[in-house]
Amino acid sequence: MTNLQPRPDAADLTLSEDDRRELIDWAARCVRRLMPVFAEHRPLDDRLRRALDAVDEFRDGRLAVGPMRAHALSCHAAARECEDAAAQAVARACGQAIAVAHMGGHARNVERYTRKALSGAALVAELEWQRASIPARLREYVFGGAS
């Protein structure tokens, strides 16, 4: 993907497959940074890790949307089993990130669940990282007009 690609239409919740492949990479990187919160409370639960591992296959065209949706649903199942609110938020963030495979608009929920998973200086730093690391042409699509 290059910066020569047009910015996606903010009203298009689906996005093209190429846009979704680019966006899911960013969303998965965001969740990988949150994984210690989940692992602290659910160290033996590998559903989020397996879902994140599938991102490379999807991005490279080796895994279809159907299996990615199944991974997203498994992340949400993991969230329902969490007793810790922060760990649950990370599992939800992962489910939303993985669901970008079928609908780009799910990326807009990564920030929301990050806010539920972290607080204080860690939250501020993480949100700054998310905004700084998203491909520039996708920033407005995910975060709206806010910078």
Image (spheres, rainbow, N blue to C red):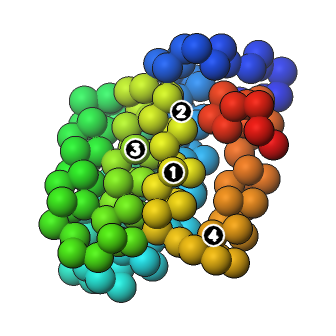
In the figure, is residue 104 to the left or right of 128? left
Circle 1 Cα neighbour tier, 10 Å, few/some/many (<14 / 14–19 / ≥20):
some
Q: Is residue 32 visible?
A: no
Earlier in the chain: of badge 3 and badge 2, it is 2
Under circle 1, the secondary element is helix
Amino acid identity at mark 1: Arg
In depth, the one of 10 and 49 nearer the eye is 10
Amino acid identity at mark 2: Arg
Under circle 4, the secondary element is helix
Residue bearing the label numbered 3:
96
Q: Residue at x 53, y 33 (%)?
A: 21
Residue 112, label in figure? 1
Disc 2 to disc 4, how far (Cα)? 26 Å
Q: Are marks 2 and 4 in contact (CB under 8 Å)?
A: no
Circle 2 Cα neighbour tier, 10 Å, few/some/many (<14 / 14–19 / ≥20):
many
Under circle 2, the secondary element is helix
Amino acid identity at mark 4: Leu
Q: Is residue 77 above or below residue 145?
A: below
Under circle 3, the secondary element is helix
Of the two numbered discs 1 and 2 in the rendering, the one whose residue sits closer to the viewer? 1
Say which quarter of the image contains residue 4: top right
Residue 21, label in figure? 2
Residue bearing the label numbered 4:
123
Q: Is residue 121 above or below residue 49?
A: below
Q: Residue at x 49, y 20 (%)?
A: 13
